[in-house]
């Protein structure tokens, strides 16, 4: 049996827009629910949400379960964001079955090259070989996994600082980097606009970065809850766009429900 294809990576290579949702609740039931809602990809976040290795594994299993029962046949692809680019952590995340990894705060081509090495087995990389006991090979149901893994793994690096912007062409030129993802919140802070990712300077920087990434022949991505901004990014070439976050969707819906009843509370019968 061949190692399954990374359909997300294939779609990016074909230039097809992929719409995603951020998962920050760190709960497998929520992950399964959201993965069955029709998004192309979801991010199991290990940087700003309380996920550890075991809860990330549970999230991956939940997303796989949702894909298996989706009556529309859509297989939502799970992406795992690690908290930092530690090769040992990347190895563990890959071994539990992640095939697409996003790494925050990448600021140089040298850093990107080391991340590529962390994603690959020797002789092209430094990923430790433990596939026989790992979910990544489904415990050797994919017997050629170690030889096929490099083709099916996808590395996304986050550009979210002034330093990263300055090196974006060099980072995009690194072989093995499949996509560059703009992080608006940290980028805004780095540009002197903490808490204001919609500032005109930040928007201009985001658009410039997307154009540069596309010009270098790589896939550009971003997270934004602003529909107009998401559509604008797609217009100028972004191809993997996360359009919401589970925590914000739940909080927004809950606040709206409470507000409706507080503004016009039901009157008790006399």
Image (cartoon, helix red, strand yellow):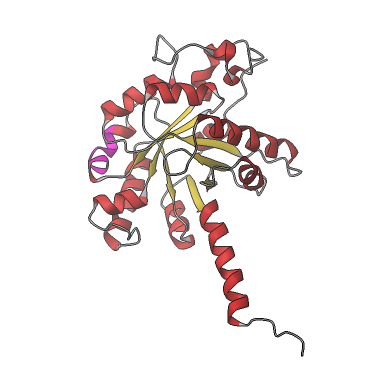
Q: In which quarter of the image is the C terminus?
A: bottom right
Q: Is residue 68 visible?
A: yes
Which residue is nearer to you in this view: 72 or 236?
72
Residue 163, quarter of picture: top left
Residue extending furthest toward the front: 270
The x, y position of residue 134, in whole percent, is 57, 17
Report if residue 63 lies within the magenta region: no
Residue drawn where x is 62% and y is 23% of the image: 4
Q: In front here: 166 or 53?
A: 53
Point out residue 189 in the picture as x, y percentages from the top left corner.
Answer: 27, 53
Camera sees residue 245:
no
Residue depicted at 33% across the width and 57% down the height? 203
> Is residue 19 shown above or below 122?
below
Could you tell me what secondary structure mostly forms the magenta stretch? helix
Residue 260 in the image: state x and y as whole percent: 61, 76
Q: Residue shown at 49%/26% (left/top)?
A: 93
- The answer to whether 71 is drawn above or below residue 5 in the figure is below
Vertical placement of 125 versus 28: above or below?
above
**Looking at the image, which residue is at 55% across and 52% down?**
246
Q: Is residue 202 above or below residue 43?
A: below
Query: Is residue 76 rendered to the left or right of residue 23?
Result: right
Q: Is residue 211 left or right of residue 1?
A: left
Nearest the eye: 30 or 230: 30
Number of numbered discs on residues:
0
Determine whether, in the image, residue 64 is placed left or right of residue 186: right
Quarter of the figure that contains the N terminus: top right
Is residue 165 covered in magenta?
yes
Q: Give the range drawn in magenta.
A: 163-170
Q: Whole-percent x and y of residue 211?
A: 34, 47
Query: Who is closer to the viewer here, 53 or 146?
Result: 53
């Amino acid at each position: 049996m061949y190692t399954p294809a990374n359909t997300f990576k294939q779609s990016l290579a074909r230039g097809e827009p992929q719409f995603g949702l951020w998962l920050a609740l760190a709960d497998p039931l929520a992950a399964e629910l959201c993965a069955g809602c029709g998004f192309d990809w979801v991010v199991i976040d290990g940087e700003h949400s309380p996920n550890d290795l075991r809860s990330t594994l549970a999230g991956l299993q939940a997303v796989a379960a949702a894909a298996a029962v989706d009556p529309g046949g859509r297989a939502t692809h799970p992406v795992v964001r690690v908290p930092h680019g530690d090769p040992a952590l990347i190895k563990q995340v890959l071994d539990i079955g992640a095939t697409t990894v996003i790494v925050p705060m990448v600021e140089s081509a040298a850093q990107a090259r080391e991340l590529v090495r962390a994603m690959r087995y020797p002789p092209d990389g430094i990923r430790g070989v433990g596939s026989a006991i790992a979910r990544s090979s489904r415990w050797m149901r994919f017997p050629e996994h170690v030889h096929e893994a490099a083709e099916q793994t996808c590395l996304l690096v986050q550009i979210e600082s002034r330093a990263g912007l300055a090196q974006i062409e060099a980072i995009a030129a690194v072989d093995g980097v499949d996509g560059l993802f703009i992080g608006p919140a940290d980028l805004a802070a780095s540009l002197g606009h903490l808490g204001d990712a919609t500032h005109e300077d930040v928007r201009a920087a985001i658009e410039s970065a997307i154009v540069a990434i596309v010009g270098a022949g790589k896939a550009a991505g971003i997270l934004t809850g602003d529909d107009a901004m998401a559509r604008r990014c797609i217009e100028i070439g972004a191809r993997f766009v996360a359009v919401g976050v589970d925590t914000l969707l739940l909080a927004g819906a809950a606040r709206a429900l409470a507000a409706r009843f507080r503004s016009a509370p039901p009157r008790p019968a006399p």
